[in-house]
Image: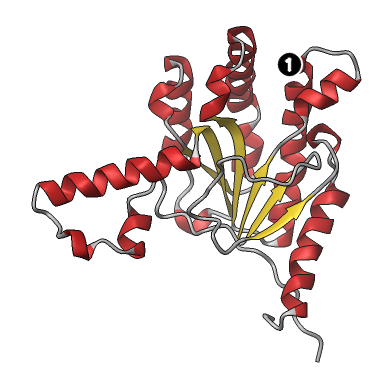
Amino acid sequence: MENKKAIPTHVAVIMDGNGRWAKQRALPRTAGHREGAKVVEKLAETCLSAGVRYLTLFCFSSENWNRPQDEINALFSMLDEYLQKETQPFRKKGINFSFLGRIELLPEKIRRRIAELVSKNLPPEQEKMHLILAISYGGREEIVEAARHLAQKAAEGKIKPEEIDEKSFSKALFLPEIPDPDLVIRTSGEKRISNFLLWQSAYSEFVFLDTLWPDCTEKEFHAALDEYAARHRRFGKV
């Protein structure tokens, strides 16, 4: 009897290579970011049709605040445009949204847009996939915030230090209701995780694609899902 193909419940993606894509074409970096934004729909469609339930995209890291202000402004302008125009088609397909990171640091206009978008999420029984956008996010920062939260509770006598374990620590993270990623994909040929989901990816499978993010197609995404399934077959997990 043929084994059922393993499908990851949660896929997380480091969308890398926008800047290099633009540089290769003698274009401004913002052109790479705009072209990369178009790829998100392809990935979402691939994951949705495959049966993936959660998709997390690393959109803007906490370190990205160190980029030139003009580039930051352009990124947030594109994000606002994307959230305003491109999310409704996702909603019709049963895709809900969450946001991961220090959202309070974002421009007020973006914060309002995010709050409005989340408030319109479909009820759980109508959800087919959950899209998480990591914005102003850093894995180390998230871990430090969780440690501070638990330390404060201990100082207030609400918990005992010896009661802190992996389960309680996980619940103190930014989005504890989202399961850990089964598969982490990074594009552009770089083989590092760049401070992304450090705690949550402890047991994730990693697939590194050589393709720059704006050049990624459904073929690359299917190949990554197939590699995940192949590893599970190889080690007898399915």
Q: Quadrant of residue 225?
A: bottom right
32 lies above or below 50: above
Front in this rendered view, residue 71 or 139: 139
Residue occupying the far right of the picture: 25
Residue occupying the far top of the picture: 70
Q: Is residue 43 left or right of residue 132?
A: right
Q: Which residue is mark 1?
A: 30
55 lies above or below 89: below
23 lies above or below 168: above
Q: Position of residue 231 (x, y in %)?
A: 75, 71
Name the residue at 76% across, 78% down. Answer: 233
Front in this rendered view, residue 114 or 209: 209
Name the residue at 46% across, 55% down. Answer: 124
Q: Quadrant of the N terminus?
A: bottom right
Name the residue at 77% across, 84% down. Answer: 3
Q: Position of residue 75 (x, y in %)?
A: 63, 18
Q: Secondary structure at mark 1?
A: helix
Kind of residue at disc 1: Thr
Q: Position of residue 46 (x, y in %)?
A: 76, 52
Q: Quadrant of the C terminus?
A: bottom right
112 lies above or below 129: above
Residue occupying the far bottom of the picture: 1
